[in-house]
Image (cartoon, rainbow, N blue to C red):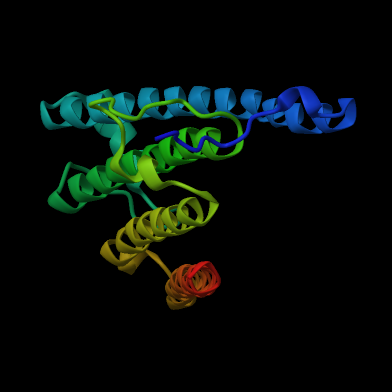
């Protein structure tokens, strides 16, 4: 039985259509730039981790760098490595990891969706979400990643609550809820679109 394959007739594209379609490759330098940003985050992660380990082992320079990093402007600077200080540094490391995950989703998912297929089907390391990625899925995943990053920042603020004004904490909480509502609105909109598309297809 003959299989139906989608018609591919790129030779029928007009020069203008070919130019417009090829313009998607202009995004390639942007994704390469994000890869460089990922390298910067990796370097920053290892610098912070090295200073944390050095501070735990009694290195004065590493301890000073760690205390400067976690001290809120205007607040009293700690004099030693405490449990709260370690927790704030670790949350900062987790924040870097989550932003790196966000970068990976934008780089891989965005390139796959808007530039060119990478033909990863069957590859053992293919991300599970990439098999059904599209613009709507990518939007939802990015919104969830942003909520996770916002949660880390909000947790760091609450742990260091004595150093912040109540107004600052209130606005950070309001902004976090705004991210939550935005993600829910995106997910609900995508659900409506998928439901409508399913009804028209049936």
Q: Position of residue 131 (x, y in %)?
A: 36, 41
**21 w.r.t. 196: above or below:** above
Q: Position of residue 88 (x, y in %)?
A: 26, 49
Q: Nearer the viewer, residue 144 or 116?
A: 116
Q: Position of residue 166 (x, y in %)?
A: 43, 77
Q: Position of residue 79 (x, y in %)?
A: 23, 44
Residue pushed farthest front?
1
Quarter holding residue 12: top right
Q: Going by the image, does 42 lie left or right of 38?
A: left
Kindly identify the residue that appears in the image at 42 percent across and 26 percent down.
119
Q: Nearer the viewer, residue 170 or 151?
A: 151
Q: Nearer the viewer, residue 9 or 121?
A: 9
Kindly identify the residue that appears in the image at 60 percent across and 31 percent down.
115
Kindly identify the residue that appears in the image at 48 percent across and 69 percent down.
198
Kindly identify the residue that appears in the image at 66 percent across and 30 percent down.
27
Pick the quarter of the image with the N terminus: top left
Q: Going by the image, does 79 lie left or right of 107?
A: left
């Amino acid at each position: 039985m003959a299989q139906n394959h989608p018609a591919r007739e790129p030779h029928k594209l007009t020069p203008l259509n070919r130019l417009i379609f090829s313009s998607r490759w202009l995004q390639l330098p942007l994704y390469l730039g994000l890869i460089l940003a990922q390298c910067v985050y990796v370097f920053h992660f290892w610098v912070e981790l090295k200073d944390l380990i050095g501070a735990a082992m009694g290195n004065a320079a590493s301890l000073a760098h760690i205390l400067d990093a976690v001290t809120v402007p205007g607040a009293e600077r700690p004099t030693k490595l405490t449990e709260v200080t370690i927790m704030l540094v670790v949350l900062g490391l987790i924040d870097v990891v989550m932003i790196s995950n966000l970068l990976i989703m934008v780089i891989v998912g965005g390139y796959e969706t808007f530039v060119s297929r990478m033909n990863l089907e069957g590859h053992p390391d293919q991300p599970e979400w990439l098999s059904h990625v599209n613009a709507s899925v990518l939007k939802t995943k990015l919104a969830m990643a942003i909520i996770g990053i916002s949660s880390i920042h909000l947790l760091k603020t609450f742990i260091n609550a004595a150093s912040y004004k109540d107004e600052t904490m209130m606005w950070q909480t309001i902004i976090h809820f705004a991210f939550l509502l935005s993600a829910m609105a995106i997910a609900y909109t995508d659900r409506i679109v998928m439901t409508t598309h399913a009804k028209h297809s049936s």
